[in-house]
Image (cartoon, rainbow, N blue to C red):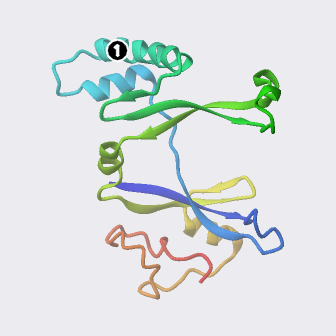
Amino acid sequence: MSIKYKLTKKKNPMKKDDPAKWYAIPNSEKPLAQKALTRAATTNTTMAAIELEAAMELLAAFIPQQLQQGHTVNVPGLGSFRLSFKSDGVEKVDDFRPEKMIKSPRVVFTPSKELKERTLHGLSYEEGGVLENKVSYASLADYRKAKGLPTPAPGGSGSGTGGGGGTGSGGQGENPLG
């Protein structure tokens, strides 16, 4: 499975004086609507899409209830959900005031080993454009054209992405810095 990425310039927050560098970010698509998701997930199964939709709604109502009771919720094959928060510290136990000292509660999801393996196994990466100053270019070639940058010669030094070639991308997967 090939995952599209966009190149974007970012500064390293730990090295604010260094010049920005080009980084790849996932080219996230709009998520499927719930009905489309359940139809796609139940294709070639005996489960009706409406049954999966109902099960998902039940699980979505069940998880917060369990988390509020202090439980970790493990969804087999998917992962686990748990509550987490930050806290100020005190020197004496009797000085602790939860209403003032517990902060930033959040839900943490940890994917299962199986989910990670099924998702990450066999991934390759495909250039999907450039994002610069809130302007999205459809491809690296379009970015180079808009900026008046030279197009690298085909067969030049490759980027070493390991994604295989054969896509007819015309060098779009090359490193934008060289």
- Under mark 1, the amino acid is Ala
- The quarter holding residue 73 reads top left
Q: Residue at x 44, y 74 (%)?
A: 170
Q: How far across and down, in percent of the image, does residue 56 sit?
A: 39, 18
Tell me the quarter of the image containing the C terminus: bottom right
Q: Nearer the viewer, residue 148 or 68?
A: 68
- The quarter holding residue 137 reads bottom right
Q: How far across and down, in percent of the image, does residue 89 sit?
A: 77, 38
Q: Residue at x 54, y 35 (%)?
A: 108
**Disc 1 crowd, CA 10 A, few/some/many (<14, 14-19, 20+):** few
| Number of marks in picture | 1
Label 1 element class: helix
Check disc 1 and report the residue beneath it: 55
Q: Residue at x 52, y 18 (%)?
A: 64
Q: Residue at x 35, y 67 (%)?
A: 167
Residue 145 left/right relative to 172: right
